[in-house]
Amino acid sequence: MFYKEEQRVNDQAFAFLQSVGLEHLADQKASSLPYGKQRQLEIARALATGATTLLLDEPAAGMNPQETEALAEFIKTIHTSRALTILLIEHDMNLIMKITQRIIVLDYGKVIANDIPENIKLNKRVIEAYLGEEQSEYAQD
């Protein structure tokens, strides 16, 4: 009986890893994975709870550009494949602009903008608060 239950749980875990594209890492210890894959696994573990809303607090912190790009694709994939609401707290503007549908910008705890990425890029208050007085690369796109 115990063996059957253990096998069922293992099968369920492997199926979940397959659903998020991490099945090839199933035999690896989490601590031995590259940093970007560790972050993906953390997100996958949260998804395994059956959550319909996911809060990610600076998921790209400490990642190199390649890991950040892979994370962006991973987040987009899980968002669309699972009809998942994702709240993202992040300072990496490239990541934010690539994957978000709506951005709420806070400055000292006050909302200074709430709009789509295309409009946030041009918002003078956002540029002044986060990107400096001069136009940023985001505002010139």
Image: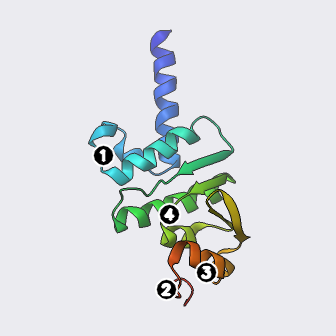
Q: Is residue 80 above or below residue 3?
A: below
The residue tagged 4 is: 91
Horizontal and vertical percent position of residue 118 = 65, 81
Residue ID at (51%, 24%): 8
Residue 28 in sight here: no
Residue 18 in sight here: yes
Horizontal and vertical percent position of residue 90 = 52, 59
Calculate the distance from the C-alpha at mark 4 to the C-alpha at mark 2: 15 Å
Number of the front mark, 1 or 3: 3
Residue ID at (51%, 38%): 45
Tell me the quarter of the picture where residue 107 sits: bottom right
Considering only order in the chain, which callout, 2 or 4, is on the residue closer to the N terminus? Answer: 4
**Residue furthest bottom as drawn:** 140
Colour mode of the rendering: rainbow
Camera-side residue of 9 and 44? 44
Amino acid marked by disc 3:
Lys
Amino acid marked by disc 4:
His
Question: Taking 32 as reference, is 54 left or right?
Answer: right
Calculate the distance from the C-alpha at mark 2 to the C-alpha at mark 1: 34 Å
Considering only order in the chain, which callout, 3 or 2, is on the residue closer to the N terminus? Answer: 3
- Pointer 1 local density, CA inside 10 Å: few below 14, some 14–19, many at least 20: few
Tell me the quarter of the picture where residue 62 sits: bottom left
Mark number for residue 121?
A: 3
Number of the front mark, 4 or 1: 4
Amino acid marked by disc 2:
Glu
Considering only order in the chain, which callout, 1 or 2, is on the residue closer to the N terminus? Answer: 1
The residue tagged 2 is: 137
Question: Taking 116 as reference, is 133 left or right?
Answer: left
- Pointer 2 local density, CA inside 10 Å: few below 14, some 14–19, many at least 20: few
Calculate the distance from the C-alpha at mark 4 to the C-alpha at mark 3: 14 Å
Camera-side residue of 6 and 83? 83
- Pointer 3 local density, CA inside 10 Å: few below 14, some 14–19, many at least 20: many
